[in-house]
């Protein structure tokens, strides 16, 4: 498993250890700013679990590990749109070259399956209707372009070499262990400290918010049950929610004033709506169990109770990024 020390990856490790304890897991993670060994601390020394510190772009290391497993699930990625606008080349390296290295090792060692965890952002802005798995990819940010590029590389390996490929395209995921640069943990951790809650432009951008536990259950279902004849699966709730609603809900849960909401300068090339057709994944028998309201309450509670986890992360480099990213709204 690549990128298993990150947000979704570590939650997926947790799911597998609890529901499929017979599965042996090797986690390879570079431990960038968003990768955190604390996310996996409960598994240290557990039988059937191994952690390796390394980069998926390191072909020699990847090949040595791939020789000892029969499948790869790739969570490893540079993932944040805002950071991709500042440092796009890092995204190309990890999301495209790294994916290619993993594909080559999976091909060489005849793995049973290669599952690439992608994003709904590869579809680009969806002004009307809903994105289906067969739709053209029209990414508009360096992040989404790098993820689309990784998908194209993996698809090329499937077509050229018979790589047994599965792809999941998840919507905006939130929950425990999410690095506090994404919207929901930014809102929660700022509210805890009575800091402004930044929303781009007028807060009207629409997203489909899926709780990380539901997302991981969907990935597990695709990995173990999906036919290779239908390799791509959208994962989301089918419910659209704008940033204003999310911020207001967080403040209501925390009993904080709405005056904490602060509108900031818009991000370049901002996609104002993503919307997924999730009929294919629900056709496999999956459906979300955690509604947004419940998920936000659980997530608020987790960040309130785990300040020892996130406070060390919001220091130094984090605040340098934050100040560069959230600029005053010019009206």
Image (cartoon, grey):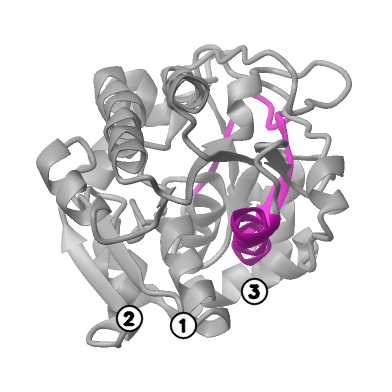
Q: Is residue 256 visible?
A: yes
Q: From mark 1 to mark 3, how far is it between C-alphas?
A: 29 Å
Residue 185 spot, x, y in % from top left: 50, 56
Crowd band around label 1 with a 10 angstrom C-alpha radius: few (<14), some (14–19), many (20+): few
Q: Secondary structure at mark 3?
A: helix
Q: Which residue is mark 1?
A: 22
* Residue placed under numbered mark 2 in the picture: 48
Span shown in magenta: 196-225
Query: Against 53, is 268 above or below?
Result: above
Residue 213 falls inside the magenta stretch:
yes
Question: In the rendering, at what x and y percent does residue 202 appear?
Answer: 68, 26
Spatial CA span between label 2 and label 3: 30 Å
Residue drawn 78% across the image and 48% down it: 281
Residue at x 64% of width, y 74% of height: 298
Identify the residue under disc 3. 298
In front: mark 2 or mark 3?
A: 2
| Point 51% across, 24% down: residue | 155
- Label whose residue precedes the other's in the sequence (1 or 3): 1
Q: Quadrant of the C terminus?
A: top right
Instruction: Give the number of marks.
Output: 3
Residue at the left extreme?
60
Do the residues bearing badges 2 and 3 touch, measured as CB atoms within 8 Å?
A: no
Residue 123 position by quadrant: top right
Q: Nearer the viewer, residue 84 or 301?
A: 84
First in residue order: circle 2 vs circle 3 = 2
Q: Is residue 217 magenta?
A: yes
**Residue 79 appears at what percent x and percent y?**
42, 37
Mark 2 in CB contact with mark 1 (< 8 angstroms): yes
**In the rendered structure, which disc, 2 or 1, sits on the residue that comes first in sequence?**
1
Q: Secondary structure beneath disc 2?
A: loop
**Quadrant of the drawing holding the N terminus:** bottom left
Residue 257 makes an appearance in the image: no
């Amino acid at each position: 498993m690549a990128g298993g020390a990150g947000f979704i990856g570590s939650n997926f490790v947790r799911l597998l250890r609890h529901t499929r304890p017979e599965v042996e897991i090797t986690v390879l993670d570079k431990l960038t700013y968003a990768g955190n060994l604390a996310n996996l601390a409960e598994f240290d020394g557990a039988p059937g679990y191994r952690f390796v510190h390394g980069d998926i772009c390191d072909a020699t290391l990847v090949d040595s590990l791939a020789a000892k497993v029969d499948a790869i699930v790739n969570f490893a990625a540079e993932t944040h749109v805002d950071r991709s606008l500042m440092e796009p080349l890092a995204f190309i390296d990890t999301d495209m070259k790294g994916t290619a290295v993993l594909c080559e090792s999976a091909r060489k060692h005849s793995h049973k399956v290669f599952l690439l965890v992608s994003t709904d952002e590869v579809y680009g802005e969806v002004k009307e209707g809903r994105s289906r798995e067969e739709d053209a990819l029209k990414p508009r940010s360096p992040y989404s372009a790098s993820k689309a590029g990784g998908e194209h590389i993996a698809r090329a390996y499937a077509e050229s070499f018979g790589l047994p490929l599965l792809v999941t395209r998840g919507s905006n995921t939130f929950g425990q262990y999410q690095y506090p640069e994404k919207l929901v943990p930014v809102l929660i951790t700022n509210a805890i400290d009575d800091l402004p809650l930044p929303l781009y432009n007028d807060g009207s951008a629409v997203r489909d918010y899926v709780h990380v536990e539901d997302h991981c259950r969907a990935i597990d279902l695709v990995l173990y049950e999906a036919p290779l004849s239908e390799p791509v699966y959208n994962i989301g709730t089918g419910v659209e929610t704008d940033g204003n609603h999310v911020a207001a809900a967080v403040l209501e849960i925390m009993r904080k004033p709405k005056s904490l909401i602060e509108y900031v300068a818009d991000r370049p090339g901002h996609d104002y709506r993503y919307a997924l057709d999730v009929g294919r994944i629900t056709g496999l028998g999956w459906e979300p169990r955690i509604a947004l309201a419940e998920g936000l309450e659980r997530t608020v509670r987790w960040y309130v109770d785990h300040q020892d986890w996130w406070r060390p992360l919001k220091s130094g480099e984090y605040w340098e990024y934050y100040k560069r990213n959230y600029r005053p709204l010019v009206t």
